[in-house]
Image (spheres, rainbow, N blue to C red):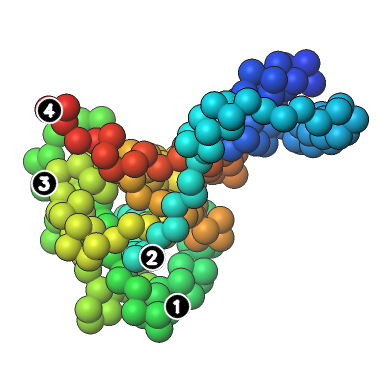
Amino acid sequence: MVDRLGRERLLELTLAGTPERALASLAAASPEDTADLGALREDLALLAHAAPPVEPPKRLRERLLATRPRPRGPRRPVLVVLDMINDYLTPGRPLEVPRARDVVSAVKERITWAHEKNVPVIYVCDTHEPDDEDFRDWPRHAVAGTEGAEVWPEIAPSSGDHVVHKRTYSAFTGSSFGPLLDELHADQIILTGCATEIGMFATAKDALERGFVVTIPPDCQAGMSVVAEHVALVTLAALAPFEPRYLRAAP
């Protein structure tokens, strides 16, 4: 059961200037909080309309306009299919993600759309050497050169698609994924695959910190449970992309 924030706490956060994105994400964990937040917004709007208008000082207006958020408008998307491999989708395997089989059809439709729109498709696949230290903590899986490390046949890569191999949670760590995105001049990642709360979360978080706009179609992601998916997606919804300039080393 999810603990509620409560109406008073939501009001406190609202009056403290908590960003709308963060407020909505916090309230989304509880239907009651979502309803309370909507009611609070209506009450505050009515209160604001009832107050007499006040002309803001010129300096305040200039400061607000200078700091207002500017939504990013990505123009070069890529479609990423993450960890949709046999070892994660085959029934009975040690690290099976059963829900992943339910999204294969939707992922396949996205891949077809990407090919039709000339949007690059990147398959990022968990891949390990036979003696990988990862197997000290996880069951043996996705060993390079084995059937288990291959993409699920129904959504196998086509000619012209890209395949990237990774050995940890995030697609960016120790792989060619980042350089490939640079090569493709990508500014948006449409992320599909599994598992939502592990590899997809780690990849999306890293992408947001690199300035990419990240979109996760709800019907194209699968976690170990509905609750795990919800928590991961709500958390990611609260994170805005960092502007790339913040990532550069200080002079």
Q: CA distance from mark 4 to mark 3?
A: 43 Å
Residue holding disc 3:
130
Tell me what residue is drawn at x 24 percent, y 36 percent: 247
Q: Earlier in the sequence, mark 4 or mark 3?
A: 3
Q: Earlier in the sequence, mark 1 or mark 3?
A: 1
Tag 2's secondary structure? loop
Q: CA distance from mark 4 to mark 2?
A: 30 Å
Amino acid type, residue under disc 3 in the picture: Pro
Amino acid type, residue under disc 1 in the picture: Trp
State the image quarter where residue 189 is shown. Answer: bottom left
In the displayed orientation, state which residue is furthest to the front.
58
**Position of residue 28 measured from the top left corner of the image (x, y, whole percent):** 67, 36
Residue holding disc 2:
75
The reply to whether residue 33 is in sight is no
Q: Nearer the viewer, residue 203 or 241?
A: 241
Residue holding disc 4:
251
| Figure check: 12 above or below 189 | above
Q: CA distance from mark 1 to mark 4?
A: 43 Å
Residue holding disc 1:
113
Q: Earlier in the sequence, mark 1 or mark 4?
A: 1
Q: Earlier in the sequence, mark 4 or mark 2?
A: 2
Q: For the residue carrying disc 4, how many other residues have a C-alpha within 10 Å: few (<14), some (14-19), or many (20+)? A: few
Q: Earlier in the sequence, mark 2 or mark 3?
A: 2
Amino acid type, residue under disc 2 in the picture: Arg
The reply to whether residue 77 is in sight is yes
